[in-house]
């Protein structure tokens, strides 16, 4: 028998012995009509066998523990608090014990013990600065540990909340915070003002593809240059998949819309674009990358609209290109050269959204 298997078996036996002691009196009937709250000692045994319970760190005897809950998960947390806890610890740190294979164990276990037993969290790890360590201890409880590490990195760079949530819970969710490459990308995102989350999503797809093919350096690049490379790559992928044909797709259930201003007599309209040819024309006139979004429209994930004004004298003027997702949520809206909506175009956008029940997505877009 190998040393590893032998050691694991010893831990399992030790866990079983201590778990049985801890649960012995609780699993007995107090009376024939009153039964104490049953405990599943196999759950505690599992904590031992995974190397998550160390007797040398216990501050209380396991056999003196009492639970007030029937819920197994709450029992487990109660037991952990009993044997380990001196001071409060962020709720998300209990992931160390609740996930089957949490990222970072045993490092994260050391963090948990340091925090709850009064040590210096800032000094027990080398991933975060002192400022970032403070942010981490006050991070959202509904995030995982890894999500909160990225949340902290974004907050330290003063990245806005919408982008921070997208990075932590969508883009970098399975990426370790030790990655120099992706940390460098955060700095580029920070330096690009008013970048849309959906644009970052496209760039992430491009970068993942490049990383799978080999090394790709961010040295000397700006986020603007990455957007150009990403748009070119998406177009190439679109051509590879569909050829150079004029793609068409069925419309979303949002009819074309017109509104005539009583004051200016200008007619505003919002029309849906239903072919790759129309997307290319829109992209050329507005000088942005909507032409590469054909794959989204063909797949039914998005619908693209264009806002135009007509004063009856001059040629029609394009103002905005709008993307709506399948849930009738506003994904993104861009003016000429990717500028945000403003003035009358912004007011017309809100009016159009209200008429058709379109909401502004606040999650990760």
Image (cartoon, rainbow, N blue to C red):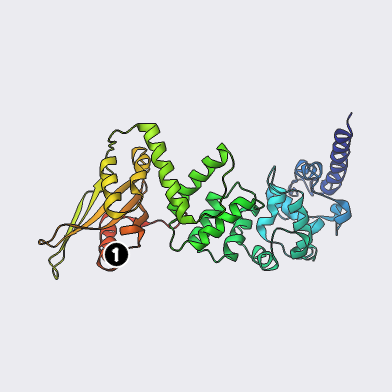
Query: Mark 1: which secondary structure?
Result: helix
Which quadrant does the N terminus fall into? top right
Residue 194: image x %, image y %?
43, 62
Quadrant in the rendering for residue 261: bottom left
- Would residue 127 appear left or right of 314 to someone viewing this image? right
Which quadrant does the C terminus fall into? bottom left
> From this viewpoint, which residue is outermost toward the top?
1
CA neighbours of label 1 inside 10 A, class few (<14), some (14 to 19), many (20+): some
Determine which residue is flagged by label 1.
346
Residue 278: image x %, image y %?
25, 44
- Would residue 101 appear left or right of 308 to someone viewing this image? right
The structure residue drawn at horizontal position 13% and vertical position 63%, both measured from the top left corner, is 311
- Would residue 180 appear left or right of 280 to someone viewing this image? right
Give 77 or 348, whichever is nearer the viewer: 348
Residue 336: image x %, image y %?
30, 59
Vertical comparison of 21 with 143: above or below: above
Give 346 or 12, whichever is nearer the viewer: 346
Instruction: Judge whether residue 275 can be spotted in this image.
Output: no
Residue 207: image x %, image y %?
52, 45
> From this viewpoint, which residue is outermost toward the left?
313
């Amino acid at each position: 028998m190998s040393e590893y298997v032998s050691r694991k078996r010893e831990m399992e036996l030790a866990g079983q012995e201590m778990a049985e002691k801890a649960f012995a009196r609780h699993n007995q009937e107090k009376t024939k009509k009153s039964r104490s709250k049953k405990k599943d000692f196999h759950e505690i045994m599992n904590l031992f066998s995974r190397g998550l319970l160390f007797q040398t760190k216990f501050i209380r005897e396991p056999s003196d523990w009492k639970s007030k809950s029937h819920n197994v998960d709450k029992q487990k947390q109660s037991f952990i608090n009993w044997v380990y806890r001196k001071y409060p610890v962020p709720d998300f740190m209990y992931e160390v014990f609740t996930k089957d294979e949490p990222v970072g164990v045993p490092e994260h276990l050391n963090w948990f013990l340091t925090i709850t037993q009064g040590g210096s969290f800032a000094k027990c790890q080398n991933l975060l600065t002192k400022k970032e360590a403070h942010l981490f201890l006050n991070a959202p409880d509904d995030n995982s540990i890894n999500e909160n590490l990225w949340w902290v990195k974004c907050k330290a760079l003063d990245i806005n909340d919408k982008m921070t949530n997208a990075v932590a819970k969508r883009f970098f969710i399975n990426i370790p915070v030790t990655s120099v490459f992706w940390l460098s990308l955060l700095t580029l995102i920070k330096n690009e003002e008013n970048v849309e989350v959906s644009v970052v999503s496209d760039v992430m797809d491009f970068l993942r593809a490049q990383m799978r093919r080999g090394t790709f350096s961010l040295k000397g690049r700006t986020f603007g240059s990455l957007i150009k490379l990403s748009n070119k790559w998406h177009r190439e992928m679109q051509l590879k998949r569909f050829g150079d044909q004029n793609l068409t797709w069925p419309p979303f259930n949002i009819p074309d819309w017109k509104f005539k201003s009583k004051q200016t007599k200008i007619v505003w309209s919002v029309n849906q674009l239903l072919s790759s040819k129309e997307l290319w024309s829109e992209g050329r006139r507005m000088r942005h990358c909507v032409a590469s979004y054909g794959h989204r429209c063909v797949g039914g994930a998005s619908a693209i609209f264009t806002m135009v004004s007509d004063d009856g004298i001059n040629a029609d003027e394009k103002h905005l290109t709008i993307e709506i997702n399948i849930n009738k949520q506003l994904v993104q809206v861009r003016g000429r050269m990717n500028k945000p909506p403003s003035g009358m175009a912004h007011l017309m956008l809100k009016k159009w959204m209200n008429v058709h029940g379109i909401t502004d997505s606040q999650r990760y877009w």
